[in-house]
Amino acid sequence: MSDHPMSRDRVHRTCDVAIIGGGPSGLAAAMELKRLGAGRVVVLEREAQAGGIPRHCGHPPFGLLSHKRLMTGPSFARLIVREALDAGVEILPRATVMGLHPGGKVDVSHPDGSFTMQARRVLMATGVRETPRSARLVSGTRALGILNTGALQGMVYLKNLAPFRRPLIVGSELVSLTAVFTCRRAGIRPVAMIEPSARPIMPWQLHQVVRALGVPLRLKTQIDSILGHGRVEAVRLRVADGSTLEMACDGVLFTGRFTPESSLARSSHLSIDAGTGGPLSDQFGRCSDPAFFATGNLLRPVEHHEWCWREGKSAARWILQDMNGELPEGETLRLRVSAPIRFCMPQLLVRGAQGGMGQVQLRVAQPVRGRLCASDGENLLWARNVRAMPEQRILIPTAPLLKARRGGDILIRFA
């Protein structure tokens, strides 16, 4: 099922809420806004069809919590698009937002012509992307057969193509297991999965699934360079003792190391958090320009679709509160972290505010075990013993943090 594109004379250059991104978080927010009577809600989706990343994931489980049904990604995407259209949400596909301006104004490029849209509020839900080869600084030839998981899924599930037969998988995050499932769907048999750390990033039980599927996992191993003329022929790997070895393969699949799709926000007037790479926000998803909100994986890399779905619905309620003048304002507390913590989200807390996310979310850069503390100088606000792996969600309740003294930062660290 395709979206219902707006013809040129139906493009509304003003709306109550403009939502940038038509994935699970954006569509959930759009439907909730319509349910709550927010007025005109327009989803600006740069692809030809809305639905987000699930469109490319031809495997379950999708929809178990949000819809109490077990679906593949494409089925889930079609369902939520249909639900949004039935709710009265206007979806404009092939609409690329080129610029953000103070007060809720966005520049849009569309095949029918460019225009500027003025919204009372703008919700950014542009999601995440995997780190490509270029950003990982992997040397070697520019041969065919080098992809990330998203590109592989698009080729397998949307185009019924197999870009290689014996690739090497780089990374051991949860998405790396998804890559293995996608390969099996297309008759592709990876030669190995490599991980530079001493332990896989995915949970131990899932790591055993990878082995059971016939993909050996090499730990303390990283890719040094890619070899081949025209097409990938082999890779040079660097192992723990510093030596190198060559492994024959016909492709390289880079997985994980997600980063928010924040190029639009970065090129705008909005403040960016150095830790997450996404926009700086408070516990209501409100950005440095209060006409702009953010939700879903733009706020942090990375959460599953059900989490983003719930977060999108919550963001809709906060936006409507804000439009009605009911969202708390006032002094904000700045949250900061120290290594090995990579980031926290949100980074700002409105003092004395009720509601909002209710929890601060953290990620660590390496396996860690210790006492996690939050303090405003000498005053300990919260502490708990924590054992966590990279990419594992760590949550701190916001209630004790809101008791911090005025005018000070809150530092979150391992004691």
Image (cartoon, grey):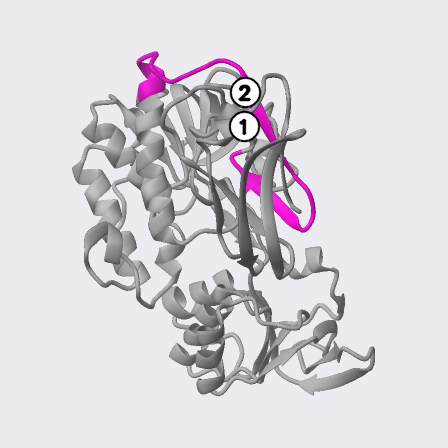
Q: Does the magenta run of residues contain 340?
A: yes
| Residue type at the position of mark 1 | Leu
User: Considering only vertical position in the picture, is 279 above or below 415?
Assistant: above
Q: Quadrant of residue 56?
A: bottom left
Residue 48 at x, y percent in the picture: 37, 47
Q: State whether residue 115 appears in this view.
A: no
Residue 167 at x, y percent in the picture: 57, 79
Instruction: Tell me which numbered mark, 2 or 1, is placed earlier along the sequence.
Output: 2
Residue 146 at x, y percent in the picture: 61, 69
Residue on which the image places disc 2: 332
Q: Residue at x 42, y 80 (%)?
A: 184
Residue on which the image places disc 1: 348
**Residue 180 in the figure: left or right of residue 335:** left
Q: CA distance from mark 2 to mark 1?
A: 6 Å
The outermost residue toward the front is 379
> Which region is colored magenta?
321-346
| Residue type at the position of mark 2 | Thr
Q: Pick whichever, 325 or 383, lies toward us.
A: 383
Task: Give neighbour class at mark 2: few <14, some 14-19, many 20+ (Cα, 10 Å).
Answer: some
Q: Quadrant of residue 15?
A: top left
Task: Give neighbour class at mark 1: few <14, some 14-19, many 20+ (Cα, 10 Å).
Answer: many
Residue 371 at x, y percent in the picture: 60, 50
Mark 2: secondary structure: strand
The numbered disc on residue 366 is none
Mark 1: secondary structure: strand
